[in-house]
Image (cartoon, rainbow, N blue to C red):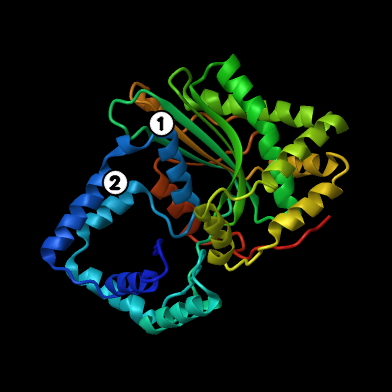
Amino acid sequence: RLEADGYDEHLGEVLLQALDGMLAPTFGAAELERARRQVTDDLADTTRKAPYELAMDVVGALTTDDQFDREAVLAEVAKVDEKQVRSYLQALRDEGMRVQLLVVGNMGKASAQDLSAKIATRVDRVLPPADARRARVIMAERPVEVRMRNPIQGDVNHATLNAYQYGVPDVSERVRMMLLGKMVENPVYDSLRTKKQLGYIVFGFVTEHVDVLELRVLVQGDKEAPDGVDVDIERVLEGFGADLKNLSLAEFSKWKSSIRSGLNHKDQNMGQEADRYWAQIVNDGLCFNRKELALEYLDSLNSPKAVVETFQLLRRENRKVSVKMFGANADPALLAAPSPVPGKPQPVLLVGANATKRRLGSEGGASYYPTETACRITK
């Protein structure tokens, strides 16, 4: 991905020069070694991120077919040589690339189209959308659990991250999940942070992972080990589900107003405007009227019934991916699989994100969520 901003007079030429440098870079062994050291230092320095951020990286490596964990990338960076890099760059030109361009600002339509045509001539083979590589999210058809040590040396904090996959939503499902994300914030924080004081970092939220919506709850702290925190999270969600069924129309209207306010929030600068458009371009969804569709559906919701049913479906399918990261002072025995709980389905239990990813996606039979965007309303 290349970005350039500034006055439009020479912006196109700057972008073309950068593209030429990316497709046919001039470098030798010394430059490659410097780049290798920099990448290695960045990846090896685990203190650049908090434990909960490292846990979120693990979820990405676990469930996305084109992502890999930090240790796997470090191992490959150490092995790559100049010949392999040049071979990869040549393969990019031979096999082709998907080219997408967004211009926002004072560059005219004709100039933008001319720039697009020039960019296309720099690429030997431009791939159509159907032939381009798209990241796919692996479906957790049974619960998945990763048990691992906090990779930050000497950090006593545990991190527990539970991600509950919903799937690829249409606009109406997206609105219902947005409502759930808003509603779950306070119960998660009040119970796990304020009452139980499990850590200073406690969040409950809905997020989009590639094209898949997920409800996530994360806790970072040293008071309680991840197995206990996992039980606490499940209890909070059970209580939330019970309260949701008793939500009054007045309370539901307040939550709708909150979502409506967020949807109507205007871009504050050109960067935000570009990000909003680019999100619809990069996934080939082109759902530029999603805000209008979302508002239309939101206005049609007269009761919380559909939101309650969405949460019940999320809990019933239980496509749960859990990362349990144990702090430096934790007993090493805790990293092993716990004793089975009678009457409960046992999750896929492995130590380390990359091992679990291989189990999920590379031993046959893995299911993936679709990559198409659903730009429509369903009741």
Q: For the residue labelled by badge 2, is the local secondary structure a helix, a strand or a loop?
A: helix
- Frontmost of labels 2 and 1 is 2
Q: Is residue 212 above or below residue 234?
A: below
Q: Position of residue 376 (x, y in %)?
A: 75, 62
Q: For the residue labelled by badge 1, is the local secondary structure a helix, a strand or a loop?
A: helix
Q: Is residue 89 above or below residue 234?
A: below
Q: Which mark is residue 335?
A: 1
Q: Position of residue 192 (x, y in %)?
A: 58, 22
Q: Position of residue 325 (x, y in %)?
A: 42, 32
Q: Which mark is residue 43?
A: 2
Seen in the image, is 255 located left or right of residue 34?
right
On-image quarter of the N terminus: bottom left
Q: Residue at x 60, y 28 (%)?
A: 233
Q: Amino acid at mark 1?
A: Leu
Does the image show residue 265?
A: yes
Q: Nearer the viewer, residue 195 or 70?
A: 195
Q: Is residue 121 above or below residue 325?
A: below
Q: Amino acid at mark 2?
A: Leu
Q: Residue at x 34, y 74 (%)?
A: 13
Seen in the image, is 82 located left or right of residue 106?
left
Q: Residue at x 41, y 61 (%)?
A: 5
Does the image show residue 248?
A: no
Q: Position of residue 113 (x, y in %)?
A: 50, 79
Graded by Cα atoms within 10 Å as few (under 14), some (14 to 19) or many (20 or more), the crowding at tag 2 reads some
Tell me which label, 2 or 1, sits earlier in the chain. 2
Q: Nearer the viewer, residue 208 or 79?
A: 208
Q: Residue at x 47, y 23 (%)?
A: 225
Q: Is residue 51 above or below residue 307?
A: above
- Numbered-mark total: 2
- Measure how far apart labels 2 and 1 are at the Cα level: 23 Å
